[in-house]
Amino acid sequence: MADRIEEHPILGVVEKGRKVCFSFDGKEIEGYEGEPIAAALKAAGVMVHRYTQKEHKPRGIFCAIGRCTDCVMIVDGVPNVRTCITPLKEGMAVRTQYGVSDKAFEEQ
Amino acid sequence: MNSVNDRSRDIGEYVPAEDDDMLICRCEEITKGEIRRAVHDGMWTMTEIRRYLRAGMGLCQGQTCSWLVKGIVARELGVSPAEIEPATSRVPMRPIEMHIFAKEGDTDEE
Amino acid sequence: MKRYDLIIVGAGPSGLSAAIEAAKKGLNVIVFDENEKPGGQLFKQIHKFFGSKEHRAKVRGFVIGRQLLEEAAEAGVTVKLNATVIGLYQDKEVVVKQGAGIKHYKADSVVIATGAAENMVLFPGWTLPGVIGAGAAQTMMNLHGILPGKKILMLGSGNVGLVVSFQLMQCGCEVVALVDAAPRVGGYGVHASKVARCGVPFYLSHTIVEAEGEEYVKGVTIAEVDDKFRFIPGTEKHFEVDTICMAVGLSPMSQLLKMAGAEMTDDPRRGGQVPVCDKYGRTSIPGVFAAGDVSGIEEASSAMIEGRMAGVIAAQFLGYIDKEELDKELAELDKALDGLRQGMFAPANRGKLIEKTEEGIDISSNLLKKGYVADDEIDRFPGVTHKKGIHPVIECTQNIPCNPCQDACPKKCISIGDNITSLPIAVYEGDCIGCGMCVASCSGQAIFLVDEDCGDGSATITIPYEFLPLPKEGTKGVALGRNGHVVCEAEVVSVRSATAFDKTHLLTMRVPKEYAMTARFFKEAEREVSR
């Protein structure tokens, strides 16, 4: 997990919750309980959270504080979940959002 | 009357620009060209632009693009952004699922 | 519907400060914040704050956040998190979304302390994943322990852009360039200098032409702009980056006040749409007050004082204190706030080009264009003196309201005087013992201990060091100049760490004596490769 800061020169050792498994588009990945879903995805190298409705353009983390809504994904079947402020739980099913669906545009 | 509301003012025709396809409203995917054209269609206030194009009416409610839209409208009208009438502020300030909104007040007092 | 004497929206520096003051006066106070954690931006601020003791200077932002939360708890303030205020109605009825419910509360007074939102600028590719706000970078690295990227370009040379660039390097990211369309660095020179000496090139009068990549950012092209901000053909520069970070200003989040019917104005000097209010935050609605960035963009230090003002004013509004007590308290807070609003970066000086310091010294033009004071400019500042033996070299070259260095020296080698914005003077008679308290106390990391001639052809330079891994005694590497370029070989002769230094380590390096006044940073030999 090269994208995680293990020890910070000012903040010290970064405290994390329990390690948990969740799925991203059906693939099992690991993260820490309670951290934002977006943080766990970022640590796993996931950049694209969704594709837009009209232009089908990729979007990812932008504001990271729940304002811009660019990082929304389908979490446990619910669309438009702001992953940057939604805490990760064991077993969550996180899916890329295409428009407002979890089906790729050509399947919609 | 300030110059922004002076509808007799001639702001000229819409002239296409190179960066008209730049996306401004990230949520509703509205471009700079659409906003510029809307100004020439007579939409001079932020509220008008919102209703006409839905720019700033998406999930984030204009949190990101408001000041960009304002800048574009101001430029098109040849005024300072400070003169552009801001959009109405109303409840809810943040996106809320309808089922929560529907239960307003329907919760226990602490 | 539950009633409170005072409802505060926003648990950042101003909201919490307002809550503490009001609760101390006996008001029944509740603070709502939409975030999962309180403190606003304070917990993302890991640098030491500027100011004087009364402004909590040299304390790191996140520590101030903890202190405020403790004080709030002691004062009996209730802080409700994950509680989004979605509406402010007539008669101070506050509508709050909490979990899956919406509740209404009645307040007798309200403090709006909702802070600000980040501005963004447009360029082709600005919607690509990997283009983020500076606040997002801070949130990821300082709250969640996640690297925002590996190779990053920063757009914006204001204090946010500078501070976040430094923070990115502290957690191990590479900042490939700091870019600003403005012709001059917008933030404090000391913040710029600590970034520049690490080797980050500054591109002023430059902006982003395009972010490249299909699915996410893979590169970025910048180009120089003329005085009308038009690209100058042929000046394009390309960088391979995975992240572009925008720090291009903030806008007040004042919508709640507008909703409540407060008179609003659009004031570019305050950052956009703000309530019409007096200097203490009284809006046009009696009993509704504004504090912090929502009423004009400033630093967290001033937000805290504005919050305290709003707190005591609310107390007087509801009769908990009388006019006399209010005036007494406000007089004190006024003084504290005025202290912060002085110097080159004072709100009144925004947008002005200042060419001379208060002392009449020419401001370094290199500092404003490239982020560092050039070697041939540094000697004209009063903190830079030469003497035999170890002594402080204070590279503080702009008038900013900050004075912890003056109190830090047990031997009184550093003097600022009563005017908090004066440039620190190295007192020649002072007998430096090399304790390093000044180095660690300088929030701008602008103080060095230098022994210009150790007698064996070498010089030693003690620098503040806040990176990992911490080099050890004997570590060999290179010394970098103020511009971040290698000036000579260097060896670490000591590394001192102490609780009093508060995570700023004092790294002393030995260099050939001719580099005593140019070597200002240390880079370990292998680290360059491994990074």
Image (tube, rainbow, N blue to C red):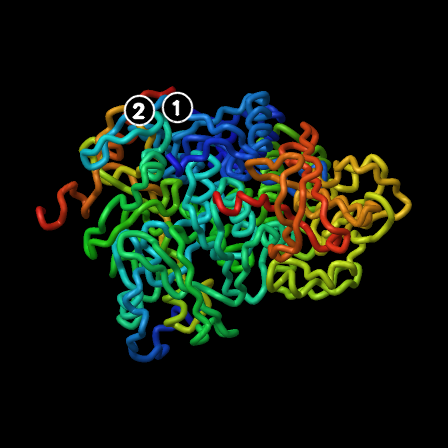
Q: Amino acid at mark 1?
A: Gly
Residue under label 2: A20
Viewer can see residue C323:
no
Q: Position of residue C158 (x, y in %)?
A: 55, 55
Q: Nearer the viewer, residue C318 or C172?
A: C172
Q: Position of residue B78 (x, y in %)?
A: 42, 73
Question: Relative to C398, is C46 on the left or the right?
Answer: left
Viewer can see residue C233:
yes
Q: Position of residue B23 (x, y in %)?
A: 30, 60
Local SS, label 2:
strand
Q: Residue at x 60, y 64 (%)?
A: C369
Q: Residue at x 74, y 59 (%)?
A: C378
Residue under label 1: A17
Q: Nearer the viewer, residue C288 or C153?
A: C153
Q: CA distance from mark 2 to mark 1?
A: 9 Å
Chain letter of the residue beneath label 2 in the structure image: A
Tell me if mark 2 has few (under 14), some (14-19) or many (20+) residues whose alpha carbon lies within 10 angstroms of its own: some
Local SS, label 1:
loop
Location of residue A44 by image quarter: top left
Q: In what quadrant of the picture does the C terminus of chain B appear?
A: top left
Location of residue A39 by image quarter: top left
Q: Amino acid at mark 2?
A: Val
The reply to whether callout 2 and callout 1 are in contact (CB within 8 Å) is yes
Residue at the right extreme of this rendering: C429
Q: Residue at x 33, y 29 (%)?
A: A31
Q: Position of residue C479 (x, y in %)?
A: 65, 50
